[in-house]
Image (spheres, grey):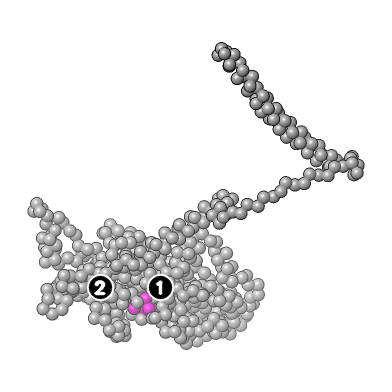
Amino acid sequence: MPADDQQFLDVLSSLPNHIKKYSGEVADYVDKHVEKAADVVRETLSTAEWVPDYMRPKAPPPPPVEIVHMSTLERMQDWVVRHKILTGVMVVTVGYVTYTAVRKTKYMRKSRRAKRARNGGRLEVVVVAGSPSLPLTKSLSLDLERRGFIVYIVCSTMEDELMVQNLSRPDIKSLSIDITNPLSAGNSIERFATYLQTPHPAVPRTKPNYLTLKSVILIPSLNYQTSPIATIPPSSFADLFNTHLLHPILTIQSFLPLLTSRLTPPEAAAAAAAAATDKKGSTVPEGPTTPKVLVFTPSIISSINPPFHAPEATVCSALSAFTEVLTGELRPLAIPVTHIQLGTFDLAGFVPQTATTGFSMTGGPVRHHAHHAGLLPPTAETMTWPESARHAYGKNFMSQSSSAISAGRIRGLRGSSLRELHNAVFDVIDGSDQRPLVRVGLGAGLYGFVGRWVPKGLVAWMMGIRKVDELRTWSEGSRSAGSRGSETDSDDGSDTGGSENGGGEGSEFIAVGHEHEGASNVWKED
């Protein structure tokens, strides 16, 4: 059979298969669209109101719901897709917390030890200018001595020296300096400088070593009274500025010649130059170690300046300004000054448990007026005020005293561990932390933020300060009593115009003495 005929027969034999295939596709297409059109017509007629009920077709049943069981991973992926913003915030928060925890753990485990000589002798000296009775002075001195420093605590009285001796540590010594006598203070600093420039053996029959002054730490008094300004006697303000402000300033002033003198004994300088000589024979100059100045101040009250805390707010603000000026003066001399703002610390190991109700923000007991016998609760303290002061300030003082930061402490929280303060101080002395301002302790950073950005009125309202509507009327008896007192003073011979010690117009100073009973403040009682 010819090939053309065979090809023709193959085509004819395949036609039925193609016809069957195409006819099936056409039938399926028609059935599908016809069924779909029928469903549409049926659904339309079932919802049409003009069709009678007996002629209205039934609505088609809903398609069956297929329940698919999702795994836990699939559910989590679906939730993440539906909450992208919240997921991003959670990831950033967890990452920050993890980074902070790892960094803090590494920071706490860092080895912190002072340098020692080859024979094990101590080489570095730290001077702590603070009262030995302060808990922070005790804890910091003990920690620095444990880390390998020779610690000198500035003492001005025999009682202070006895407190230092009671610590029973051979490398915690007293440094007697009478700050109130400039000549005596200068002689004490000169003797201390001579001591640093003389080699000292760590133990007998060993090579003597030269000591290096690493830091001077200023810890002013951290205890302040809380009371309205009107009820604080002028003598209390004078004593406060003398002990809390003037004494720290004079202390730093006494140490400035020692800090700027670059103590380097000739023998030590020659030895350092010989040790620093390189292979070529040229000498690499090495300057003496620069001591650092650390100034401590409370920060919670001075950050927000709440009512009834005028002494602490005033003194701390003045010390902060003094520290800034000191930093500017010593920066050209390459003497770093660090201002350490303190929060709240747990000082349970250094303060008697019976005085916990009187702790200040740094753990010390709150000192009230000189005529107060010890520590008084707010209710008892207001009873010592004149009646006019109780009417004007009593309610707000009681509300503020019961607030979360009464007397500078954060109620309900124990405070930060002293280890954080010790580590921060060592890092500043060691040079690891070169920031001019370091905040350490519970609430130091938070209240600094609140003081800068939160309105003062809102802070006072949160502490319970409210408007006073009822005030005591000024009485003629009080006015006449004040007049009689002025006449009595004039009769006694006091010259208000130009006496040498008086506070008149021609006087340069205001004479402030201890007030008599009944005239301890500006409120006069008949």
Which numbered marker is on residue 105? none
Q: Which residues are magenta?
A: 134-138
What secondary structure predominates along the stretch shown in magenta?
helix
- Seen in the image, is 45 located left or right of residue 210? right
Q: Secondary structure at mark 1?
A: loop
Is residue 494 visible in the rendered structure shown here? no
Is residue 5 visible in the rendered structure shown here? yes
Contact, mark 2 vs mark 1 (Cβ under 8 Å) = no
Residue to which mark 1 is pinned = 417
- Seen in the image, is 98 located left or right of residue 250? right
Furthest-front residue in this view: 1
Residue type, mark 1 in image: Ser
- Seen in the image, is 81 located left or right of residue 55? left
- Viewer-nearest residue: 412 or 70: 70
Residue 323, x across and y down, in percent:
36, 64
Residue 250, x across and y down, in percent:
32, 72
Whether the magenta-drawn stretch holds residue 136 is answered as yes
- Viewer-nearest residue: 50 or 158: 50
Whether the magenta-drawn stretch holds residue 489 is answered as no
Q: Residue at x 22, y 63 (%)?
A: 289
Residue to which mark 2 is pinned = 148
2 or 1: tag closer to the N-terminus: 2
